[in-house]
Image (tube, rainbow, N blue to C red):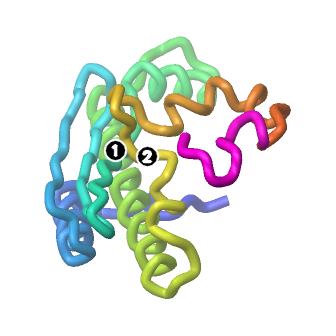
Amino acid sequence: MRRFAQDTSVPISRSRGEIEDLLRTWGCTKLGWSDEYDEGRATLQFVWVRESTQYIARFAVQLPRRDAFIAEWKRKNGSWSVPAESTIEKALAQGGRSAFRVLLLWIKASLNAVEHGIVSAESVFLPWIVTPDGRTVAEALVPRMADLLTTPAERLLPAPGRKP
């Protein structure tokens, strides 16, 4: 199956710029990128205010890693040799361009769903909202997912009329 943006020639800088423009238009008050080259990751963090509540959301974009590409190339080609450096660099660059186009598509679709009243912004961005301890909601809850899904809602949520 063909993957979205797998052959895109759009530079990462342009995709980032489009994401920034989209979030700024939506009303974000702060936005920043962090590149972690050793980890093969780029992180987007933004802030928006809704009904006097400030929300911070953070997305980590996993970029293709050199070692993973080489291992996959060897597997596909049935070879012990390493691909040419130009092949590696070209594939990593393409993977980065694709990842940022997909992030742009996802954010654009999500904000359109919010604008049309299909979902709330809080619902869409809930997994990526940053908690007071610096983790995202997903980072805090996903490791506990099995327990959370087997715990009755009454034990997870405060009783009606009681503050959490």
Which residues make up the magenta segment?
Answer: 154-164
Q: Are marks 1 and 2 in contact (CB under 8 Å)?
A: yes
Residue 13 lies, with reference to residue 62, above or below; the image says below
Q: What residue is at 70 percent from the left and 31 percent from the top?
A: 145
Residue 119 is drawn in which quadrant? Answer: bottom right
Q: Amino acid at mark 2?
A: Trp
Give yes or no for residue 159 being in the magenta stretch: yes
Q: Is residue 14 visible?
A: no
Q: Which mark is residue 110?
A: none
Instruction: Return the x and y of residue 55 as percentages of the image width and height.
Output: 32, 53
Q: What residue is at 27 percent from the left and 47 percent from the top?
A: 44
Q: Amino acid at mark 1?
A: Arg
Residue 17 is drawn in which quadrant? Answer: bottom left
Left or right, residue 24 beside residue 4: left
Instruction: Return the x and y of residue 58 as percentages of the image width and height.
Output: 34, 44
Please name whichever residue, 154 or 89, is drawn nearer the observer in this view of the structure: 154
Residue 141 lies, with reference to residue 4, above or below; the image says above
Element type where label 1 sits in the image: strand
Q: Which mark is residue 128?
A: 2
Please name whichever residue, 152 or 85, is drawn nearer the observer in this view of the structure: 152
Instruction: Return the x and y of residue 131 as percentages of the image width and height.
Output: 39, 36
Left or right, residue 112 beside residue 14: right
The residue under label 1 is 58
User: In the rendered view of the protein, which quadrant contains the N terminus?
Assistant: bottom right
